[in-house]
Image (cartoon, rainbow, N blue to C red):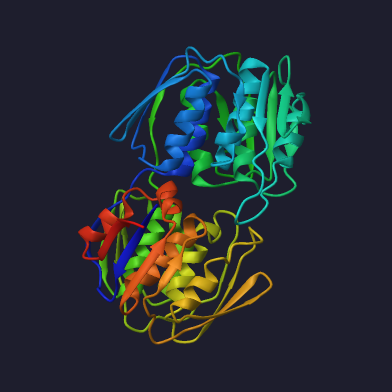
């Protein structure tokens, strides 16, 4: 197992280039099951979750190759319609193969994801929607087994906004008979990116990026190619890195429009931010202002930026209240930040953060992907040495984070424990 050792207190200065979005690449990779043949993608990050999805597709009979940022997936020989527990337990996004398998092959057997460190994230919304499309679904020995001759278009209203649920059902409905309307659909840029790729494959989808998505089913789809959109959460993480270290970063190959809620809060915290077409420039300040935040589905403040923003607020000049409204257990980074000298108290689904004058380096343990990022950010700002263990969480979602940070002046190294 590996860990990161960080000598903090150094302002970051320079240029950071943003990688492709994991959360856009994974559903697009799953969508290749809808059309046999060779699919081609660029700007695909080299991450643990991408590798896991490749292994899952390989288990089903697909052949893939990932060279640099170029990924090809050949689904010509898919013949295993199952996602086994050993793979699904390591990556919940594996559930995204459920819709495509049922739509194209008429059957799927996908392991239930089980528990998750940051919250339950149940898949009942996926199952109810597939049943409304005409699938016969049952739970059998820990697996979701779904069957259908051909799915039938209908109106589906999600009880709550669900990103993977919207993506799964949108893929299934692309090959359904008739028109499907998804109400209360997720509006995330990753959902819109998936719809764009499905349309390139020959689907007829409109309204992606709004609360109502309309899918006119087609008889078949064909392979295509696309470029994966930039990772907005990685972008936001580096914006915080500039602010928490009092540095100056130029963040390239990003999409500023995808970060409006984050940018507004960082500006209220005192950071100076300038946006250009595919570039964001951020200047940190000495006196960080305390700002309240509530997470909310897109275009609200993303839950995936809550931990990183909290790290910044530990050095605020007052008291901030950070309320988590998406996941019920996403404050596991709080005890670790407090080990570094932060002053954070939990009250239900809110964290009361009283700013301190400085953080101190300490040994800390990552508990999930975004919690890991918050500890790295805190370590960059802290006095002394911080050791972040269990960084395999980081490698799920940040491409060569330590290398990118070193290039802009961070004193950070990866070592074996």
Residue 196 makes an appearance in the image? no
Compared to residue 237, the image places residue 277 above or below, namely: above
Compared to residue 126, the image places residue 117 above or below, namely: below
Quadrant assignment, res 98: top right
Compared to residue 29, the image places residue 294 above or below, namely: below
Please report the residue visible at 43 percent of the width from the left and 77 percent of the height from the top: 340
| Nearer the observer, 179 or 248 | 248
| Residue 167 image point, x, y percent | 59, 36
Classify residue 357 as left or right of residue 326.
left
Quadrant assignment, res 311: bottom left
Classify residue 198 as left or right of residue 217.
left
| Nearer the observer, 116 or 221 | 116
- The quadrant of the image that shows the C terminus is bottom left
Quadrant assignment, res 324: bottom right
Please report the residue visible at 32 percent of the width from the left and 70 percent of the height from the top: 380
Please report the residue visible at 61 percent of the width from the left and 20 percent of the height from the top: 81
């Amino acid at each position: 197992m590996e860990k990161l050792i960080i000598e903090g207190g150094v302002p970051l200065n320079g240029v950071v280039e943003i990688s492709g979005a994991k959360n856009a690449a994974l559903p697009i990779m799953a969508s290749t099951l809808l059309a046999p043949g060779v699919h081609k993608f660029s700007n695909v990050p080299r991450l643990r979750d991408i590798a896991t999805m490749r292994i899952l597709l390989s288990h089903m009979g697909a052949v893939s190759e990932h060279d640099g940022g170029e990924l090809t997936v050949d689904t010509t020989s898919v013949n295993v319609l199952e996602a086994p527990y050993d793979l699904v337990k390591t990556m919940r996004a594996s559930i995204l193969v459920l819709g495509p398998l049922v739509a194209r092959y008429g059957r799927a057997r996908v392991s239930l994801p089980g528990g998750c460190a940051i919250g339950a994230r149940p898949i009942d919304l996926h199952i109810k929607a597939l049943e409304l499309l005409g699938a016969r679904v049952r739970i059998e020995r820990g697996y979701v087994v779904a069957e259908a001759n051909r799915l039938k278009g209908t109106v589906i209203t999600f009880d709550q906004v669900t990103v993977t649920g919207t993506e799964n059902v949108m893929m299934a409905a692309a090959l359904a008979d008739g028109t499907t309307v998804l109400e209360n659909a997720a509006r995330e840029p990753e959902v819109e990116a998936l719809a764009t790729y499905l349309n390139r494959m020959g689907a007829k989808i409109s309204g992606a990026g709004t609360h109502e998505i309309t899918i006119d089913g087609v008889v078949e789809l064909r392979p295509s190619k696309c470029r994966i959109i930039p990772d907005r959460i990685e972008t936001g993480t580096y914006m915080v890195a500039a602010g928490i270290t009092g540095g100056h970063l130029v963040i390239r190959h990003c999409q500023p429009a995808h970060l409006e809620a984050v940018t507004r809060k960082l500006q209220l915290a005192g950071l100076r931010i300038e946006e250009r077409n595919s570039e964001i420039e951020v200047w940190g300040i000495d006196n960080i202002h305390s700002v309240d935040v509530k997470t909310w589905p897109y275009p609200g403040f993303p839950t995936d930026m809550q931990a990183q923003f909290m790290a910044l607020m530990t050095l605020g000049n007052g008291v901030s209240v950070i309320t988590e409204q998406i996941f019920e257990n996403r404050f596991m980074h709080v005890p670790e930040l407090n080990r570094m000298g932060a002053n954070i108290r939990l009250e239900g689904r809110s964290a009361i953060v009283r700013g301190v004058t400085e953080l101190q380096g300490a040994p800390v343990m990552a508990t999930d992907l975004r919690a890991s990022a918050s500890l790295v950010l805190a370590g960059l700002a802290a006095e002394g040495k911080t050791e972040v263990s269990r960084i395999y969480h980081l490698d799920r979602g940040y491409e060569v984070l330590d290398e990118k940070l070193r290039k802009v002046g961070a004193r950070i190294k990866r070592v074996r424990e």
